Image (tube, rainbow, N blue to C red):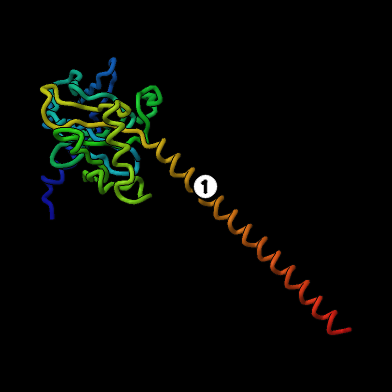
Amino acid sequence: HSSPGAVADAEAWERLWAQSRLVLQIKGQVLTCSLSAPCDLLAELVPCWQPVPSEPCQPLPGLKQPAGGKGPQEFEGLWPHPNLCVQVWSGGQVQLTQCLQDREYCWGALPGRPDDLLLLERGGNASLCAMERGACTPLANFTSRGAGHPGLLEQDLRQDVAVGQCQQLWHPSDGTGVVLWACPLHKYLRTHWALVWMGVLLGAACLLLLLLMKKEDMKGWLKSLRAGYGSSGE
């Protein structure tokens, strides 16, 4: 059982975090955040990626920084995107979360789409992997939204990165380390469903043709049956 002192301390921390507030702002193309609290707190600011609000927010590698002071803090080289959030970690737990998807930030004015795919690059285009559900899956094994076979979009996504179709979400100022890309998936999803509908229509056409052929065969069989019956009656 917890001691009364430990319970009181935990309740005090809960009240402290309840009185704290995290505010995100976009100035130009720079994302800043401000942590306001009744007193100085030992905490870290961790940018993360959250395409679906009901799913966990995936921390972005190499971007966390200590929360310091009451003024706005910048994440150098990090471009705003609708799927970006910032979490405040303290004591091994997430205490506060603020996302650009929240209505007050009007994410529709931001570059990118909520269904964009986050890619991580280490040392060149050949090392691209897709960041989903806390892991980074090589494109050769990546399956888009659970549909299609692994690696189906590998060449397309590499091409999108190479020709600038993807938004460079973050790159280190010294040119080393990882680079993050936000790549559009909606065009591939549209193509996928178009192919599905083409398959359905083709299947329906084949079935209709088969039924017509069966119908013609049935007519021929009935004619021969009638002819045979007529000749036997004579």
> Where in the figure is residue 141, as x and y percent of width and height?
26, 49
Instruction: Say which element carries label 1.
Output: helix
Instruction: Give the camera-side residue of 19 and 165.
Output: 165
> Where in the figure is residue 115, as x and y percent of width and height?
37, 36
Identified at 12% across, 52% down, the residue is 2
Q: Residue furthest top?
A: 28
- Drawn side of residue 209 relative to residue 129, left or right: right
Q: Residue furthest right?
A: 234
Query: Residue 50: which quarter of the image?
Result: top left
Asked if one can make out residue 34 in the rendered structure from this viewpoint, the answer is yes
Identified at 74% across, 68% down, the residue is 219
Query: Residue 57: which quarter of the image?
Result: top left
Identified at 22% across, 23% down, the residue is 34
Look at the picture and state if 154 lies above or below 228. above
- Drawn side of residue 38 relative to residue 145, left or right: left
Please state which amino acid type lies under the numbered disc 1: Met
- Drawn side of residue 58 relative to residue 209, left or right: left
Asked if one can make out residue 16 in the rendered structure from this viewpoint, the answer is no
Query: Residue 13: which quarter of the image?
Result: top left
> Where in the figure is residue 197, as x and y percent of width and height?
52, 47
Q: Residues within 10 Å of mark 1 (few under 14, many from 20)?
A: few
Quarter in which the N terminus is drawn: bottom left
Look at the picture and state if 212 lies above or below 172. below
- Drawn side of residue 17 relative to residue 53, left or right: left
Instruction: Give the camera-side residue of 227 and 142.
Output: 227
Q: Which residue is mark 1?
A: 198
Number of labelled discs?
1
